[in-house]
Image: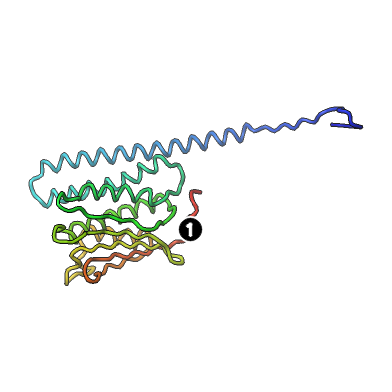
Amino acid sequence: IIEDHQLTGALVLVRDISELRRRDQLLRSKDSAIAEIHHRVKNNLQTISSLLRLQSRRVVASEAKTAISDSVRRIRSIAVVHEILSHNAEDNVQFNEILKPLVRLVSEDLSSAEKSLQFSVVGDLGYLPAAETTALSVVLNELMQNAVQHGFSDITSIESPELIITLGSSGEMLEISVTDNGHGLPSDFSSESYGLGLTIVQNLIEMDLGGSIQIRGEEPKGTNVFIQIPNQRRSVMGPT
């Protein structure tokens, strides 16, 4: 305080921030706990996956081996989500951070020594809630696997085999397109002929995410799966 150009005193403002620090500490503890939970879930899923692999070695029937292998693959896709979430305490997660490891897993498992399948990811969905990220991860994992098993069953007969995942939005809808240049759909293909994998995809898209799915043939060959999901209440700017 200055009067007549002379320092005559001082004013000190004091604020008790103990409560703010306590809340901040609680938030950090909560974030750490959530990250630890995701980490443990991921480890448990990997343990289950390893046990299933051991079990598959004792199974003789090819159908049972295939069923166990498919279960291992689905568990791995969910484990990837929890691995990313264990490093991200936010409620929303960038979907491409999940998709890229999934694509890498599928490509590593299914690449042929004679001719490899080219995977491409175009676009971005931004940030999505963790629960919806898990559902979409299972969906895309199933679609990639389905394309490889059926569209590229004889990959050596296809020139430049390629699978493209396109991500984007239109109005109030998120849009996902999975396109391959494989052998295409059988002539008698319909929703009634869906196997377990496509049935899982349809249920997750329509019942869990409230969206729609279309599966159609491409010209001159190949298959396209087009998915639309309501874009309401999603954050495209980042975590909240």
Q: How is the image coloured?
A: rainbow
Give the amino acid at mark 1: Arg
In the orientation shown, which residue stands out farthest toward the left?
Answer: 60
As drawn, is 226 to the left or to the right of 27?
Answer: left
**At which x and y percent is residue 120?**
31, 56
Q: Nearer the viewer, residue 100 or 81?
A: 100
**At which x and y percent is residue 171?**
46, 67
Q: Nearer the viewer, residue 38 or 98?
A: 98
| Residue depicted at x 30% and y 68% | 214
Q: Nearer the viewer, residue 10 or 108?
A: 108
* SS category of the residue bearing label 1: loop
| Residue depicted at x 30% and y 49% | 102
**At which x and y percent is residue 101?**
32, 47
**At which x and y percent is residue 144?**
25, 56
As drawn, is 129 to the left or to the right of 184?
Answer: right
Q: Residues within 10 Å of mark 1 (few under 14, many from 20)?
A: few
Quarter of the N terminus within the rendering: top right
Q: Quadrant of residue 224?
A: bottom left
Q: In this view, does 225 lie above or below 18?
A: below
State the residue position of label 1: 233
